[in-house]
Amino acid sequence: MPADPLQTHVVTQLKHDAPLIACRFDPSGRYIFAGSQDNSVLRWELATSTKTVLAAHDSWVRSFAFSKSGDVLITGGYDGRLIWWSATAEQPVPIKTVEAHAGWVRAVAVSPDGQLLVSCGNDKKVRLWQLADGAPVRELAGHARDVYHVAFHPDGQQLVSGDLVAQFLHWNVSTGEKVREFKIESLSKFDGGFLADYGGPHGLTFNSDGTRLVASGITNVSNAFAGIGNPIVSEINWTEGKEAIAHLTKANMNGVAWGLVWHPEGFAISALGGHAGGKLGFWKSDSKDEFHLVDLGNSVRDLALHPDGVQLATPHHDGSCRISRMAPKAA
């Protein structure tokens, strides 16, 4: 079924008793996993809404990755640890724990061939691991600030990482050598009043053919302490390392573009959260303004796309994981 963003509507709300901050569907599409501010990881079976609690981290979990088969889940926590789990077990327990970063694990990603896991964090490091057993492969050092996000290029031979000040480093996966670096000014700002930098990529992915790097975050920041600014989705020409188009919202809503996906049918989707509540924004590459905006009613901090290309999941401050469908409502 092709996706129809203009028909997007919420179909299910999966409940928890603490705010949710991140989510991912497993590769089979059977489950949705979410991280909560009570330090737990939740797994819901979509067909039954059955909830299972995974407990092992001592902090919030914002990062999820899966083996290609979907049998193994890896979570990255603000406690600096990566934990391997059996994703499909009746009651998952940790299989392996790796002390990965000195400080928060900000993001993880899996290589297209499913062999490598990359993580990044507040120790300014990017690290590669064997996904199968968590064995370290190499450390990539070069960022001067906390590393917010990482993404593999679709060819599997290139890797990009972005930090707090929107400095992006392009790496050769096989050798670990830095290929180049570039800065995207719209994605970060120094607030002279609070003497603080604010921004960085809160979401990071490539378009389907790898010609555009797509990053989400906040722009036009007027108050770093309160996080006052506008959501932005930046499409970056990968060859040139320059911003091709900065997507904003027509209403200039206040907040951050958190989770980000590039839909296989050729458009970007981001979850927008902040003082203006929670929304889903949809953009095409030929316009800076969104072509559709969906009100989700409560602040949101991540976004996941189901393998069917039609369902979306968003974790909310009110403790619910909303499942939306980009399709007409059932009669």
Image: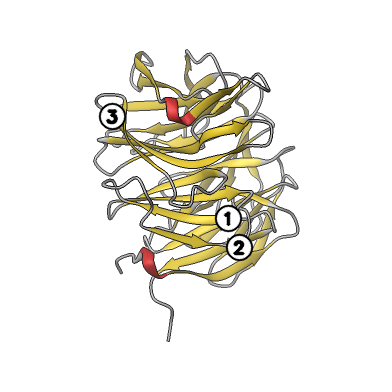
For image coordinates 30% across by 52% down, the residue present is: 264
Query: What amino acid is labelled 1 in the image?
Result: Gly
User: Which mark is first along the chain, 1 or 2?
Assistant: 1
Instruction: Kindly identify the amino acid type of the residue bearing the numbered disc 3.
Output: Trp
Q: Say whether marks 3 and 1 touch (CB < 8 Å).
A: no
Q: Specify which label sits upstream in the sequence, 2 or 3.
A: 3
Mark 3 or 1, closer to the camera: 1
Q: Residue 46: horizontal and vertical position, in percent?
A: 54, 67
Q: Is residue 132 visible?
A: no
For the C terminus, give its image quadrant. bottom left
Percent of width and height locating residue 79? 69, 31
Res. 238 mark: 3
- Residue 157: percent from the left, percent from the top? 30, 27
Q: Which mark is residue 297?
A: 2
Q: Which residue is mark 1?
A: 278
Q: Quadrant of residue 15?
A: bottom right
Tell me the element at label 1: strand
What amino acid is at disc 2?
A: Gly
Asked whether residue 195 is in view, the answer is yes
